[in-house]
Image (spheres, helix red, strand yellow):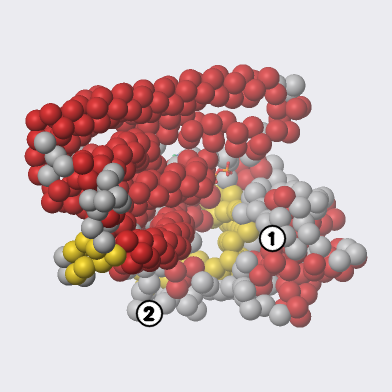
Amino acid sequence: MTLLRQLRRFARFSLQGHARQAGIILLLILTGSIVEALSLLAVIPLMRLIGADPEATPDTVSLPVVGPMSLGWLLAGIILLMLAQALVNRHRILLMTKTMQQAVDDIRMRLFTAIGQGPWAQVAAMRGSDLNHAMVADVDRVQLGLFSLMSLGQNFLWLTLYGLLSALISWRMTLFALVIGTITLAALYPMRRKTARHARFMADALQERQHVTSEFVAGMKIAKAFNSEAFYLDRLDRLLTSLRTATIEFARLTSNSSALFQLVSGSAAALFVYVAYAYVGLPLPQLVTMLLLFMRLAPRFNAVQETLQQLILSMPAFENVAGLILMFKADRDGAGSAQQATVPTLKRQIRFDNVSITHAGATAPAISKLDLDIAAGEIIALAGPSGCGKSTTADMLMGLLQPGEGQILIDGMPLAPQDRGWRDQIAYVPQDVFLLHDSIATNLRIARADASEADMWDALEAASARHFVACLPSGLDTIVGDRGSRLSGGERQRIALARALLRRPRLLILDEATSALDPQAQSQIEAAIAGLRGHMTIIAIAHTPSLIALADRIVFLDQGRIVQIRSHFPASCNDTAGKMAQA
Ligand SMILES: Nc1ncnc2c1ncn2[C@@H]1O[C@H](COP(=O)(O)OP(=O)(O)OP(=O)(O)O)[C@@H](O)[C@H]1O
C-alpha cells in the first residue's frame, strides 16, 4: 500500500467525528500563514522606505488596496500583523490540542468497546499482553502519529502558500526552488523506506517487551520460588538490546536525512542567490524577500521530511489498533443481533439440543452431540475428568461460545449469539476469582451498580461472607489488594459468590466455586447454595463430593459426551463415576 493511501486511511480513522474541528484548524493555519506572509511581504516596501541612500528614499510607498503609506504606519501595520498572527496561532494550538486529545480518547474508547463487546472466543484466543499493548502503547503511538499528521498538514499549507507568494515575486526563482525541493525529497525516499521497515521491527519489539514484562509480573512468585528471575532478566536484556539498537538506528536515519537536507538546502540557497543575481537580475528588495522566504521554507521542508518519518513510525501501531477494532466489530456484526427482541427468562427449561463445538485450532470437538434438559430451579452438577468439556458447556450456556452444531434453547427460544439480555440474567463465579484493587463494596457493585448497602450485606450473608466482612476494620470499604491479594483464597471465593448473588440471577453458574475453601468454609458455602434451591437454576462445575451431593442431578461428562446422569452422588465414591468426578 502506498504511503499516501495509508496516510489517508490514518487521517480518516483518527479524525473520525472531528472533521469540523480539523477543518477549522486548517482554516486557522491558512489565516496564520496569510498574516505571516503579509508581514513578510511588507519587507519590500520597508526596504524602499529605508533604502541605502536617505536622499533618494521616498516619504511614502503606494501599497495595493491600502494606498500610500509612510514608514511609521507601515511599521505599525507590521506590528498589528504580528499581533494577529500570535492570536491566531494561540487559538490554533489550543484547538489542535483539544481536538487531538479528544480524537485519541475516542480511539481508545472505540478499541475498549470493540474488545469489550467482541466475541469471547476471539478475545480469549489473543495474548492478554497484546491487547494490553494495543490499548496503551499503540494508542499512545497513534497519538504521536496524529500530532505528526497535523504538523504535516500545517507544513504543506505553509509550503503551498509561500510557494504561491514567491511565485508572485519571481516565478522563475520559485520554479528553481521547487525543482531543488522535489529532488531533495525524492533523494530521501530510500531513507523513508528504511524507516518503514524499521517501524515494523520496532513495533514488534515493543510488543514483545510488553509480553516479557507482563509475564514477569504475573509469574513473579513462581520466578522467585524457582530462583529463575535470571530467565526473565535474560529475555528482557536481549530484547532491550535489540530495541536500543533499533532506536539508535532510527536516530541515525533521521539525523542522516536532516544533515543531508541541511547540506542540500545550504547549497541551494547559495545557488539561489547566484542565479537570482547573475541570471535573473532580481532587484535587491525582491531578492532579500525571496531569501527570507527561502530561509523560512527550508526548515519547513525539513519538518515535512521529519514528520513523515515520525508518521511512518506510527503506522504499525495504527494498523494494529484499526485492525483490532475492525476484527472485533466485524465478528460482532457477523454474529448477528446482539439483543433479541424478546429476552428468554428461564421460567421452564434449558435445553441443549444436539450441541457440538470444536475450539478454534483443536482437532477434536470439546463437546459432541450434547442432549440435555435442565428444568428451571434445578441444581445440576457437571462432573468429569479434567478437559472433558465442563467449562466449555458453561461458556456456551453463557453465550460466550457459539455451538458449531445444534442449539441451546431457553424456554423453547434459541439462544442468540452474544445475547446481552440473556447474560443480564446470569451470574457466574469463575474458578480464578478476579477482584479489583479496590474496596469490597466496589467489587460487589461490578455485578449491580445500583446495589444498596443492605443489598450487599444480604448477598454477603447468602454467600457466608457477612461475618468475616463485618469483622474487618473498614467493613465494606476494605481494600482487597491487587486481585484480592489481601484476602485468603476462601474469602475471595465467598466475595465472588456474594457478587454473583447480588445480581439476583435466574441462572447461577459456579465453576469449582468451593475449590479454594477449607472444609468449614466449604460446608458454609454449600449450605448457602442449598438455601438458593428453588430460587434460581444452578449449574455447578464441581469436583468436591459434598458439593456434587447437593445437586438434584449429576451430569458426568467424558471426552465431550455425557456418560451418565444420576440423581444422587454415590456415598462411597468408589464407582467409576465417583472417581471421574474427583479426577
Ligand atoms: N480456547 C481453547 N482452544 C483450544 N482448545 C480448548 C480451548 N479451551 C478448551 N479447550 C480444549 O477443550 C477441551 C475441554 O476443555 P474444558 O475447559 O471445557 O474442560 P474442563 O472439563 O472444564 O476441564 P477442567 O476441569 O480441567 O477445567 C479440552 O480438551 C481443552 O484442551
Q: Quadrant of the C terminus?
A: top right
Closer to the camera, 233 or 476? 233
Q: Is mark 2 within 8 Å of ligand 1?
A: no
User: In which quadrant of the rendered image does the N terminus lie?
Assistant: top left
Residue 464 placement, left or right of 582: right
Name the residue furthest front. 55
Foreground residue among 153 and 418? 153
Residue, disc 1: 496
Q: Position of residue 6 (x, y in %)?
A: 25, 44
Residue 11 appears in the rendering:
no
Residue at horizontal 56 percent and vertical 74 percent from the top = 506
198 lies left or right of 69 = right
- Answer with the quarter of the image where residue 281 lies: top left
Please report the residue visible at 71 percent of the width from the left and 55 percent of the height from the top.
Answer: 437
**Disc with the residue nearer the chain's start (2 vs 1):** 2
Q: Does dot 2 land on a helix, a strand or a loop?
A: loop
Residue 514, x across and y down, in percent: 72, 53
The verdict on label 1 being within 8 Å of ligand 1 is no
- In this rendering, the answer to whether 287 lies above or below 351 is above
Which residue is depicted at the point 18% across and 64% down?
Answer: 62
- Say above or below: 130 vs 216: below
Give the residue drawn at x 69%, y 60%.
496
Name the residue that disc number 2 marks: 342
Q: Picture quarter containing residue 93?
A: bottom left
Could you tell me residue 314's position as x and y percent? 38, 41
Apparent side of residue 256 relative to residue 380 in the rendered image (left or right): left
Task: Label 1: state its secondary structure.
Answer: helix
Instruction: Specify the label residue 362 is tagged with.
Output: none
Residue 343 at x, y percent in the picture: 42, 77
Question: Given the image, on which type of amino acid does mark 2 rest?
Answer: Thr
Name the residue type under label 1. Answer: Ala
* Residue 267 in view in this figure: yes
